[in-house]
Amino acid sequence: MIKTISVVGLGYIGLPTAAIFASRRFKVIGVDVNKGAVDTINQGKVHIIEPDLDMLVQAAVAAGHLKAVTAPEPADAFLIAVPTPFKGDHEPDLRYIEEVSQSLAPVLKSGDLVILESTSPVGTTEQLANWLAAARTDLTFPQTHGDASDVRIAYCPERVLPGHVVRELVQNDRVIGGLSARCSKEAAELYKSFVEGECVLTNARTAEMCKLTENSFRDVNIAFANELSIICDNLDIDVWELIRLANRHPRVNILQPGPGVGGHCIAVDPWFIVSKSPEQARLIRTAREVNDGKTDWVIHKIRDAVASVEEPVVACLGLSFKPNIDDLRESPALEIALAVCGKNWSEVLLVEPFIEHLPGTFDDHANASLVSADEALKRANVIVLLVDHAQFNDLKVPLTRHPLVIDTRGMLAR
Ligand code: SAJ
């Protein structure tokens, strides 16, 4: 019977998961190496921006169901949600999972359940199990003892959309892959305490690949749209109209082109497939290259536009990685804005309604300033629409009258 759950890694996935378990009256111990985050959570506050998360955490801490600590303590179940970045060469970096396995091993006891949630290359759950087994030779593990093991280990990816995490954690289906059938079953029972979607059981390798497949599917399909946008630009065809028309076919559903693919998942996860299967993953690798290449293509478009006007002033509308959020990390819009500033082609007016100050990466660029959309429209002679924030809908009329607009999101065509 699981009474105490430890969630290791209190970021975008770990903290909401910890708070939801706490709301179901489990005793939840959140673990994070970031002391600042731990202190903030223990005050009932949050260190990340996600709708409804603040209320959930505040209630959980006030009720005494959630506390945060910097080192693992004994629990009946451990959920690991630490980052899995990649190294410079797109090779996955499992350092944080290895560190967790080392800090977790001393507090493990017979009967415990360990679930890995971090997006991971295929084989990582087995690797985690091997690290734990090497550290605790007094316990048995499922890779050697199957259903009879002392410790149960499973992989269960999340697939929540940033901005809708609290709702999607509850409503989405979960794919649960144990290292043995019993591991899958026990993990599913735990998730069923709050998941309203279906918990579908498989093995760990399939569950790992499933998460990577979902994001690669999106990446490949966005690459198709981005490639079309470049072909259409060359052929003088409006790609937005083209996609709208093609999508009238009952079995065609093309995604939307943009300035490249941002965020922490879709542009990263396909590399985890490529690094394991470099010979076979040809389309998946090419999709990554096409999407990254689209960002460079937009920068070249801006260069050509700047060259065509006298005393150029460029306005970049939007810096976040997708519409209606303030998240600038891994944002192609930000990358483009920084590149344009760095080239010193012109003064650059940056418009981002979701932030009050430019990030420090712009400190070296004296030609950059954060301004209102109205000011940007008044002063710029080259306008680049990089993010289709809902607020920019109000600009449509003046934008259509502007002589030089590079619309990477098809906002004007809508
Ligand atoms: N984008 C396009 N064209 C499109 C759709 C998206 O260019 O037609 C771009 C966006 O502008 C953005 C990027 O792709 O730069 C990613 O945006 P997104 O909203 O599609 O996805 P994320 O990164 O916020 O969240 C994704 C989701 N995955 C899928 O939709 C397959 C989410 O369900 C995952 O849980 C999350 O990644 C994750 O953690 O893996």
Image (spheres, rainbow, N blue to C red):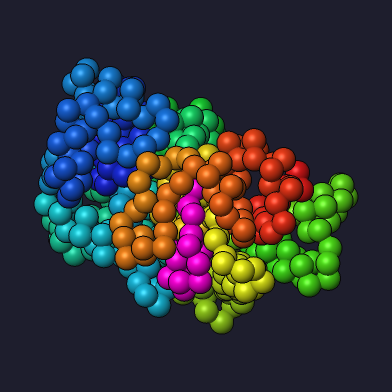
Residue 144: name its quadrant.
bottom left
- What residue appears at the point 82 percent right and 49 percent down from the top-left corner? 244
- Which residue is more in the foreground, 151 or 344? 344
Tell me residue 368's x, y (percent): 42, 59
Q: Quadrant of the C terminus?
A: top right
393 versus 147 height, above or below? above
Magenta extent: 335-351
Q: Is residue 228 left or right of 188 when viewed as pictured? A: right
State yes or no: residue 71 in magenta: no
- Quadrant in the rendering for residue 366: bottom left
Q: Is residue 350 magenta?
A: yes
Compare residues 121 and 372 and report the one nearer the observer.
372
Position of 153 with respect to 402 (left or right) is left
Q: Is residue 124 visible?
A: no
Percent across and percent down for residue 180 are: 40, 52
Viewer-side residue, 138 vs 326: 326
> x and y percent of residue 394 in the render?
64, 35
Residue at 36% of width from left, 29% of height from top? 53
* Residue reaching furthest to the bottom: 279
Q: Is residue 3 above or below residue 335?
A: above
Q: Is residue 238 visible?
A: yes
Q: Which of the 4 image quadrants contains residue 36?
A: top left
**Extreme residue in the front direction:** 310
Say which quadrant the N terminus sits in: top left
